[in-house]
Amino acid sequence: MFRRIDRLGHPLDEVIREHLPGDHRDDWAVLKKLYELLNILDTKTSSLLTFDALIVAVFTIILQKEDTAGAPVLWVSLLGTLIIILSMGICVWVVRISWPFLKPGVAITTECQAVADVVDVRTIYYQWAWRLSFAGVFVLVLAFGLRYF
């Protein structure tokens, strides 16, 4: 694991903890944990985006056949593709780099609350993206069944 180092060669979290009043050291630990949660959400969402891209590729392969024009498999595959693209769009909202709470001079408790709110919202977005992706897989199975059976 990489640790950020300040100009003097000290681990940055230790330097910050040394300069915080005693009652804010716990806040720093909470803030650090919240940033770790954001990192976990970003990683999971990136994986879900990769999975969704593979599902869209499979839908594209199903639609490559010439006899799908007007067939139910066409409409089911298009519906599945739209569901997956919606999931991917929500994933982009989770991994976007938009942290308006990072402002100089903001109290650490205020920043903790702002980061906690962002973690909550992005977790909800991730859950919806995951659900849509799950639904897209069921539609893929249906399209596959219509196409090949």
Image (cartoon, rainbow, N blue to C red):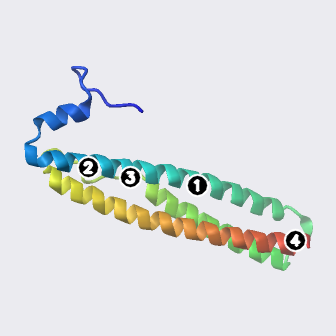
Mark sitting on residue 107: none
Nearest to viewer (mark 2 / mark 1): 2
**Amino acid residing under circle 1:** Leu
124 sits left or right of 115 in the view: right
Report the residue marked by disc 3.
37
Report the residue marked by disc 4.
147
Report the residue marked by disc 2.
31
Which comes before the other along the chain, label 1 or label 4? 1
Q: Position of residue 149 (x, y in %)?
A: 91, 73
Which residue shows up at 64% across the image and 55% down it?
51
- Most extreme residue toward the top is 8
Asked whether the residues under the numbered discs 3 and 1 touch, taking CB atoms below 8 Å apart as contact, a structural biologist would say no
Q: Residues within 10 Å of mark 4 (few under 14, many from 20)?
A: some
Q: At numbered mark 3, what does the secondary structure look like: helix, strand or loop?
A: helix
Report the residue marked by disc 1.
49
Q: Quadrant of residue 72?
A: bottom right
